[in-house]
Amino acid sequence: MEEKKPYPITHVVNWYYGNFCTRKCFNKEERLSECWNKLQEFASKNNNLKIRHKEFKDLFDNDSIKICLLKPNFRRRTVGWSQMEKWQREPDFDPDKFD
C-alpha cells in the first residue's frame, strides 16, 4: 500500500476544521470562531510544516494540540454528514454532553 503524501499545514487545518469541528460544534458559533482562530494561528506558526491528515488528527486527538474543548472520546469520533443533519434537527443537541 502506498503511503499518503504530506500536505501543507494550512490545507490539513482547513480539512480538519471542516470535517470535524463544524460537524460536532455546528451550534456553537462563538466556539467555532475561537477554534478557527487558534487553528489558523497554529498553521501560521508552523507555516512550512507538511503533515499527513492522519498524523494531524492523531496529534489533535491525543491532546498534543490543545485547542478542542470537547471531551476526548467525542473529540476522537468521526461524524458523518447524515449524523450531523440528525443532530441539527434536535433542538437540545449539545456536543459538551457527549462522553
Image (cartoon, rainbow, N blue to C red):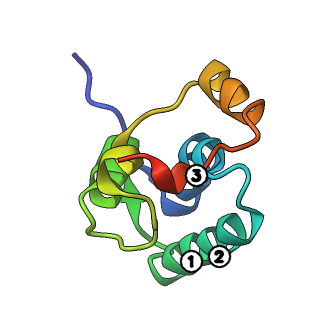
Instruction: Indicate the position of residue 43 as horizontal and vertical percent values.
Output: 52, 72
The residue that mark 2 highlights is 34
Helix, strand or loop under label 3: helix
Task: Identify the image quadrant of residue 3.
Answer: top left
Instruction: Indicate the position of residue 40 as horizontal and vertical percent values.
Output: 61, 73
The residue that mark 1 highlights is 38
Q: Is residue 6 visible?
A: no
Q: Is residue 31 visible?
A: yes
Quarter of the figure that contains the N terminus: top left
**Marks 1 and 3: which is nearer the front?**
3
Up/down of 45 relative to 76, above or below? below
**Marks 1 and 2: which is nearer the front?**
2
Instruction: Indicate the position of residue 55 as horizontal and vertical percent values.
Output: 29, 49
Q: In front here: 20 or 5?
A: 20
Q: Amino acid at mark 2?
A: Glu
The residue that mark 3 highlights is 21
Q: Return the residue found at the far front.
A: 92
Q: Amino acid at mark 3?
A: Cys
Question: How far apart are the alpha carbons under marks 1 and 3?
Answer: 12 Å
* Residue neighbourhood size for the residue with mark 2, other residues' Cα within 10 Å, grouped as few (<14), some (14–19), many (≥20): few
Query: Is residue 84 shown left or right of residue 20?
Result: right
Task: Identify the image quadrant of residue 31.
Answer: bottom right
* Residue neighbourhood size for the residue with mark 1, other residues' Cα within 10 Å, grouped as few (<14), some (14–19), many (≥20): some
Query: Is residue 3 shown left or right of residue 50?
Result: left
Task: Identify the image quadrant of residue 71.
Answer: bottom left
Q: Residue at x 59, y 53 (%)?
A: 17
Q: Amino acid at mark 1?
A: Lys
Q: In front here: 77 or 44?
A: 77
